[in-house]
Image: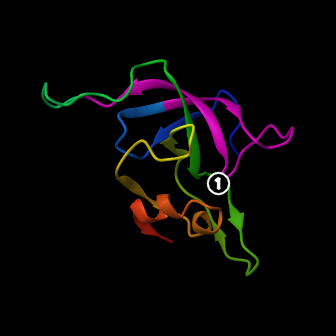
Amino acid sequence: MIRTQTLLKVVDNSGAKLVKCIKVKKKGGKMSAGVGDIVLVAVQTLRPRYGRRIRLKMNKSEVHHGVIVQTRRLYRNKGGIGQSFSSNSVVLVTPQLKPLGTRISAVLPSRLRGLKWAKLAAMAKKII
């Protein structure tokens, strides 16, 4: 579960490397977020630029929206099979909920497709 002040790894190619959760959005008073929830994040570190032609889409300390795609907390489905990941990860999106990056370099859970994030599932490297 993701709370405020949690450091999250960015798994898309938008330019950020590490972000910090500022606020959990659209949860109706709940203070923690799970897979598929929208959070407000601040950029902590950026990916290095390899060459001068690459223009970054963001700067340090900018605020963006993000979708949680991986959590370390164990999630059990109705069949009893558990699923957890090695890190807490996020994909950055625009306020209109369109992805900022063009590729996702992580394995995503299949329940993201059922939570209106089919576009993210299509961009992913693999779905389990």
- The number of numbered badges drawn on the structure is 1
| Vertical relation: 57 (above or below) 83 | above
The residue lying at 64 percent from left, 38 percent from top is: 39
Residue 26 lies in quadrant: top right
Q: Position of residue 108 (x, y in %)?
A: 50, 62
Given residues 119 and 83, the one toward you in this image is 119
Is residue 88 toward the left or the right of residue 81 in the image?
left
Q: Is residue 70 magenta?
A: no
Is residue 30 toward the left or the right of residue 37 in the image?
right
Callout 1 amino acid: Val
Residue 112 lies in quadrant: bottom right
Q: Which element type, helix, strand or loop, lies under badge 1? A: loop
Given residues 112 and 34, the one toward you in this image is 112
Is residue 10 toward the left or the right of residue 53 in the image?
right
Q: Position of residue 59 (x, y in %)?
A: 39, 20
* Range drawn in magenta: 19-48
Q: Which residue is mark 1?
A: 35
| Vertical relation: 29 (above or below) 89 | above
The residue lying at 46 percent from left, 32 percent from top is: 18
Q: Extreme bottom residue here?
A: 79
The residue lying at 84 percent from left, 41 percent from top is: 30
Mark 1 burial class by Cα count in 10 Å: few <14, some 14-19, many 20+: many
| Vertical relation: 123 (above or below) 66 | below
Q: Is residue 33 magenta?
A: yes
Q: Position of residue 40 (x, y in %)?
A: 62, 32
The residue lying at 58 percent from left, 30 percent from top is: 41
